[in-house]
Image: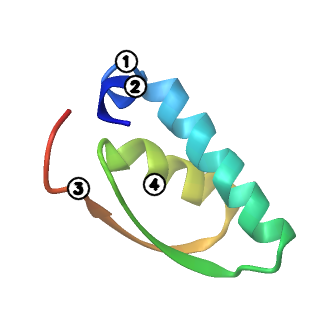
Amino acid sequence: MLPAESRMNEEDIYWGALLGIVEMIKSGTTAYADMYIQMDHVARAVEDSGIRASLTRGSFKC
């Protein structure tokens, strides 16, 4: 996965996170925990969607 992630831009991360969040909301999830690179873009998706989340930055860089 790391080679593919190194080619992802800010919008890829935002829309990927938002897609995952939409799937969680549709299945009844109300909160989740996530750890990823460039977490500020994931945080934007969380804020835009309204889901509750516990977010932390990943421990390595691509």
Q: Position of residue 31 (x, y in %)?
A: 60, 80
Pointer 4 with pointer 1, Cβ within 8 A? no
Mark 4 residue crowding within 10 angstroms, few (<14) / some (14–19) / many (20+): some
Is there a contact, CB below 8 Å, between mark 2 and mark 3? no
Give how far apart the Cα atoms at labels 4 and 2 are.
21 Å
Residue type (three-letter) at the residue carrying disc 4: Ala
Q: Amino acid at mark 2?
A: Ala
Element type at marker 1?
loop
Label 2 vs label 1, nearer the camera: 2
Q: Secondary structure at mark 2?
A: helix
Within-10-Å neighbours for mark 3: few <14, some 14–19, many 20+: few
Q: Are marks 2 and 1 in contact (CB under 8 Å)?
A: yes
Q: Is residue 22 above or below residue 50?
A: above
For the residues marked 4 and 3, what is the alpha-carbon distance in whole angstroms? 13 Å
Q: Nearer the viewer, mark 4 or mark 1?
A: 1
Image side of residue 46 versus residue 43, left or right: right
- Dot 3 or dot 1, earlier in sequence: 1
Considering every residue shown, the one lying at the far right of the view is: 26
Q: Earlier in the sequence, mark 4 or mark 2?
A: 2
Q: Residue at x 51, y 48 (%)?
A: 44
Report which residue position mark 2 lands on.
4
Q: Does residue 17 sit above or below 22 in this rendering?
A: above
The residue that mark 4 highlights is 43
Q: Residue at x 53, y 27 (%)?
A: 12
Between the residue at mark 2 and the residue at mark 1, the CA separation in whole angstroms equals: 5 Å
Q: Identify the residue under disc 3.
A: 58
Badge 2 or badge 3: first in the primary sequence:
2
Label 3 sits on what residue type? Answer: Gly
